[in-house]
Amino acid sequence: MKITFLGTGTSQGVPVIACECKICQSSDPYDKRLRTSLLLETDETTLLFDAGPDFRQQMLREHVMKLDSILLTHEHKDHISGMDDVRAFNYKSQDAIDIYAEERVQKAIKEEYAYVFSEYQYPGIPKMRLYTIPEHAFDVKGVQIIPIRVFHYHLPVYGFRVGNFAYITDANYIPEESKEKLFGVKYLVINALRKEKHVSHFSLREAIDFIREISPKKAFITHISHQMGFHAEVTKELPPEIMMAYDGLSFLCNE
């Protein structure tokens, strides 16, 4: 199973528009972050976690030629606003794309992309097939997915576990019953917006504490803002088992 970080930035990305801070002005490519999204590939299946406004750019950069399904963590714009561009995959496969989301998120998608679900189907619009994420483990094209309920301030969102890999973004609270689903993972991706405490995201310290509680073999920090600091400097502060993810980073989940 191959994991690729398509984007590791927060909702505004890095650099932030009109920002003159040192991080946004950095020439280090590791300080350039598109909106958070992740690709999971097996020999047979290609899954995408979230499709934000940089979806097209991310697909082109990683030369993604096939996409089977999209799993959505929640309905915020930086996680769903690129889905019009699934049209390219519709055309290539001559089929709709499967979208997995909870009912609240499906409602938001139908509002955001009303033209996709209207009675009159304009030629060339995206084709999406909506499926509801159950509370229990489910199968997507031969890949078993375990949904993990976490909270983004008061908003319930989903993280996901696939085998020895788990992905959690946009969270600042994880219930005990959800933690139990994470024990035993070897590779954990967790969000950390900045070093200072935030109302709806883990801080770096909170993320590190959570990683130590779950105790994976390797952990990756994502959904990073320009307020976190330079990638190179923050990396030096982290223990060897924790890594600041960056756009384009790939690794294999070995058992």
Image: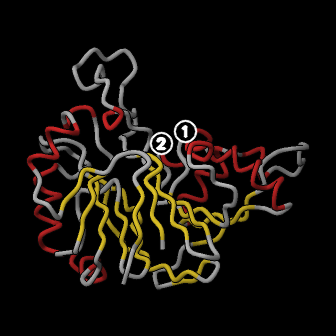
On the picture, is 77 further left or further right than 212? right
Residue 19 picture quarter: top left
How crowded pointer 2 is (Cα within 10 Å; few <14, some 14-19, many 20+) is rated as many
Element class at badge 1 = loop
Q: Position of residue 89 (x, y in %)?
A: 75, 54
How crowded pointer 1 is (Cα within 10 Å; few <14, some 14-19, many 20+) is rated as many
Which residue shows up at 43% across the image and 75% down it?
147
Asked if marks 1 and 2 touch (Cβ < 8 Å), the reply is yes
**Which kind of residue does numbered mark 1 sit on?**
Pro
Q: Which mark is residue 78?
A: 2
Q: Position of residue 248 (x, y in %)?
A: 44, 48
Please report whichever mark, 1 or 2, sits nearer to the chain's N-terminal start.
1
Which residue does the numbered mark 1 point to in the structure image? 53
* Position above or below: 237 against 32: below
Q: Between residues 116 and 212, which one lies in front from this camera angle?
A: 212
Which residue shows up at 17% across the image and 49% down it?
203
Q: CA distance from mark 1 to mark 2?
A: 6 Å
Which residue shows up at 25% across the image and 50% down it?
244
The quadrant of the rendering that contains the C terminus is bottom left
Q: Position of residue 191 (x, y in %)?
A: 28, 54
On the picture, is 55 further left or further right than 13? right
* Position above or below: 34 against 208: above
**Which kind of residue does numbered mark 2 sit on?**
Asp
Residue 151 picture quarter: bottom left
Which residue shows up at 23% across the image and 39% down it?
231
The image shows a total of numbered marks equal to: 2
On the picture, is 166 further left or further right than 58? left
* Position above or below: 72 against 160: above
